[in-house]
Image: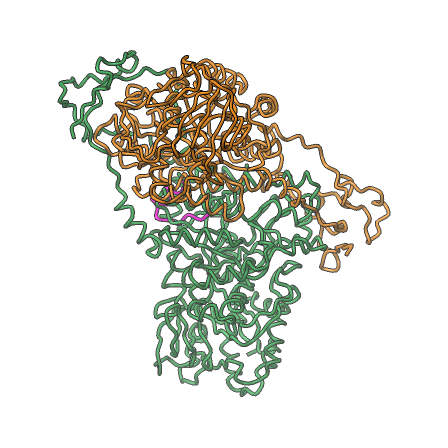
Chain colours: A orange, B green
Amino acid sequence: MSYQGKKNIPKITSDRLLIKGGRIVNDDQSFYADIYMEDGLIKQLGDNLIVPGGVKTIEANGKMVIPGGIDIHTHFQMPYRGTTTVDDFSQGSKAALAGGTTMIVDHVIPDPGSSLIEAFEQWKQWADEKACCDYSLHVDITHWNDSVKQEVETLLKEKGVNSFQVYMAYKDLYQMSNSELYEVFSFLGEMGGVVQVHAENGEIIAEEQARMLQMGITGPEGHVLSRPEELEAEAVFRAITIASQTSCPLYVTKVMSKSAADIISQARKKGNVVFGEPISASLGTDGTHYWSKNWAKAASFVTSPPLSPDPTTPDYLNTLLASGDLTVTGSAHCTFSVAQKAIGKDDFTQIPEGINGVEERMALIWDKAVVTGKMDENTFVAVTSTNAAKILNLYPRKGRIAVGSDSDLVIWDADAVRTITAKTHNSAAEYNVFEGMEFRGGPLVVICQGKIVLEDGNLHVTSGTGRFIPCSPFPDFAYKRIKARKQLAVLRPVPRGMYDGPVSEFSPMSRGGTPSASARTSPTKQTPPVRNLHHSGFSLAGNPAQRGAPTTEETPIRPAGRRIVVPPGGRSNITSLS
Amino acid sequence: MSASEDVPAFFRSMGSGSPKPRHKFCGVFCPVEGATDSKTLDLSSVSPCRGDGRVIDKQGDVGRKVEIRTSAGKEALQNLGDTSDRLLIKGGKIVNDDQSFYADIYMEDSLIKQIGENLIVPGGVKIIDAHGRMVIPGGIDVHTRFQMPDRGMTAVDDFYQGTRAALAGGTTMIIDHVVPEPGGSLISAFEQWRDWADSKACCDYSLHVDVTSWHKGLQEEMETLVKDHGVNSFLVYLAYKDIFQLSDSQIYEVFSVIRDLGAIAQVHAENGDIVAEEQRRILELGITGPEGHVLSRPEEVEAEAVNRSVTIANQTNCPLYITKVMSKSAADVIALARKKGTVVFGEPISASLGTDGSHYWSKNWAKAAAYITSPPLSPDPTTPDYLNSLLSCGDLQVTGSAHCTFNTAQRAVGKDDFTLIPEGTNGTEERMSLVWDKCVVTGKMDENQFVAATSTNAAKIFNLYPRKGRIAVGSDADLIIWDPDVTKIISAKTHNLAVEYNIFEGTEVRGIPLVVISQGKIVLEEGNLHTTEGSGRYIGRKPFSDYVYKRIKARSRLAELRGVPRGLYDGPVCEVSVTPKTVTPASSTKTSPAKQPAQPVRNLHQSGFSLSGAQIDDNVPRRNTQRIVAPPGGRANITSLG
């Protein structure tokens, strides 16, 4: 690294940067060019750039320059029953940058019953104080009523949140019923949001947990035994069904098992708009460690859905990621110390859930997918950054090296070899689920907001420099197809003559899903009785008294409550306009 | 002998047959005819059978017919009342699900007593000459809803009318569904249904019991039903929100109970929550006609529910039976699950095998409404063919009819709102012929598979085999002589039902029963039905059917889970606020009759001994509330016995 001119001030303050001789890798192509950055933006791209003096120049020597990673799923500083995850926004984003990730998207988890916006502001405040890299926020919808609906609309339109997560697990806490899911999905589908689901069948899990505890299984292996992968697959299937009914794009967080991934790829083949997110842990390790004799180690793997005990799972998920059936990668980084995990030492259901992975994500995918020849460097960029930016509607500001994009980039060293261990990682947790793994490939230089934050293995980060990046609704990547389909899918009733035959008497107790049955809990339903304009009062049978009385309320020729004997002809008299 | 004049059709179609055997035959039937008035009533109401009779007449050649006569033994008149119970079928090709062979069948006391050639039979036996035609076990319709109450109305085909129609179509046993009021007693509903059926049914029957709600006391009732009343199948609903629908946890509990009892879990698979939402949306769009029914119940919703019930059944290691498979996607989910090894059975019904849902868009409201059933018929016209293929290859196993008929006036309750239309289609009479026409005539399956799909598999699943579903010595004398060459046009004018519409109207089917024998008595011959109201017996079914439970038993032996023996964790424990995080396992016990309060199980693998010298009481609660700062070493101190 050399400096043009005499400037010798701290590197961090330098706003002007030139990367020379790098191979720029985007998700569509790779090419050799120099990059000039200023004010946190990429200003010029090409050969023989004309740049002002005093610019710091980085010689890439033909190494790859890739867009900085976007970790689309983190839980930094997550409050949990009076404690907080050990990696706060500062520690967490530091670890992210160390691994080549220059933007994180964290989940806001409001307490069920409390305000979404308040929770959002709280998270934003924490992140603004501490985050070292740009961030954005998903908001989890942990309960559903009228005010939540309004808050979601405000968040979408004014606060820059375009993705909301709902839970199909955590019975009696976050879990939503199918009807609520339907309402959330149809509302977000109209408003242009992306629905994320935590897909597990919470009701069955609760039953299975009770069964495990009854059998005397209290250790972390009970966690995975009570959450078999079928339950994940079932919930994914159900979420896809509901999303398809409501024409809403779906995003499945934490794809942990083969069967769940299979369901997603099948649904994509059928044309559903669904995105799957495997996480570092599911791509890098498996669930055999739940049976470790070391309780603390076993507990450190506890996350939901659990890692699959099938050791071929990571390989399978990497293949689907490479083939495009799974779209983005996150880390679901949510770390607890051993003491915190030990809350559940006598009852696995009490173990706080979450594993590390934000730092290892990029290197892990490179090692498992690119080094093994499953994917090329462009696909690598797509799954670690570009696709995420597209789903969040941040593309091409993030996720691409182009003029005008943010200058978040990474010089990637494909040959570096690093062994993962809790001794050297940047997370505050005592255990690393990838302990002892050797990854080939890693970031050499990381540039975030136009500043060098990692070079020569040294991190130079400043807490609080991270900006909140607002995401706008209706991301093209998800909504182009949805919009086209909505135009096609107009339903029409069949124009028929009025039925004027006999009507049997029946008791008023209604059967088969009264449409209003769930109205008490549903904010989206204001249903004034709709007048059916196709419904004509004209009848060939010629009942003059009924002419000009077209609405359904007035039409009964015979009161519905009167018993009708069999009409003389033995058949009912049907009027048909056709 | 006096009754012979009551059957003009008999004369007509006897053709060139000699009058002598006919005379004798009538002589044999005489006491029976006179014995009950209802028989005579039957004969006077044979008009529905005109279609069959007419076709047979048209065929007109001798080989077409079966000859029925009485052997001229000296003992012929020994005991007139008894002889009607003795039947010999000569020269028939016996078709079972595994093989076909030529042999004679001798029946007595409504049981098959002998099978073979040159049987030695007592005199005075009525002989039916089958002329080489197929003799197959009588059909078992696994799903009917005769006389079903719905909001003060009752399905128009009661047990008499319904079983008559069943017999006319070659079905000699039906299994009806008991639908208790939600919250009501299963046993009293069961008794009520027994009462209705015993007084009216013309053929043997059994009963499924629907679990329409899940509350305390039901587990005991189910146990009683299984142990004392011969019920081995229970249906739960994933649809009909706020009425019959059960939640996933409840289904899990019901399935666990069913597995322990050795019964079979049946599900009506549709996602009721989504259906309710879609119904509301469709009504909002101003769609109130029957097309709204199918629009609000897309087939995905069915497939989703099938998938979910398969998942729950796998978790609980409970055999699963999906009633009414109506769509390709639902059938695919079942086929896939079977490939993965799940014990699951699929039941397509007459309607889904024989017609499609395009009629929901009919301009004739009454016709469109006649097709209303749930899950709905798929609007995809290739569905019947697809389901027939899966039935042939064994991915689907049994066929029912879900026969539940309402007349147009009853349907018209929902004339302004499709959600109020009572649901159900006809099919019990047409089932056998439809399956023959769609599967055997087209070459999808052979005659043996036909027997399997229409009766044997059902008998095996519901533990009636080999009493029913097989022609063997000792089996019930329920069989039919099948004529694969006669064609018949289904029409509401000629069917044996009380409804005005037949959803298969105008369908021409090849293959009909020529003679139907139920309980050792001829109930259909030459297109004439001779049924006796109330002659049907209740057939109890034992639990732990081999066909279903062999695999389940083996798996439950394998599926024992063990905890990992570990040392006690004696490191620091963080302090927590009192609210539990995820589910407290006890949270659902309030509604669960299945759960005896769990005794805290002592973990014998867990040892109090610890290498680090910690005391056994180190982990007593005081630790939980005490805030622990990070230990000096920065790492937790874990004791591991491993």
Question: Eyeballing the image, is B285 above or below B321?
Answer: above
For residue B266: magenta? yes
Residue occupying image coordinates x 26% and y 14%: B623
- Across and down, in percent, residue B570 comes to 21, 20
Residue A192 in sight in this render: yes
Q: Quadrant of the C terminus of chain B?
A: top left
Quadrant of res B93: bottom left
| Nearest the eye: A319 or A267 | A319
Q: Say which quadrant the N terminus of chain B sits in.
A: bottom right
Residue A312 x %, y %: 31, 43
- Chain part drawn in magenta: B254-267
Residue B138: give x, y in percent of width and height.
Answer: 46, 67
Q: Is residue B239 above or below residue A83?
A: below
Q: Is B601 in front, or is A64?
A: A64
Q: Position of residue B230 (x, y in %)?
A: 39, 52
**Residue lying at 44% horizontally and 74% vertically, measured from the top left:** B135
Side (left or right) of A63 relative to B237: left
Specify the farthest residue to the right: A544
| Of residues A501 and B84, the one drawn nearer to the viewer in this rendering | A501
As drawn, B145 above or below B8: above
- The quadrant holding residue B502 is bottom right
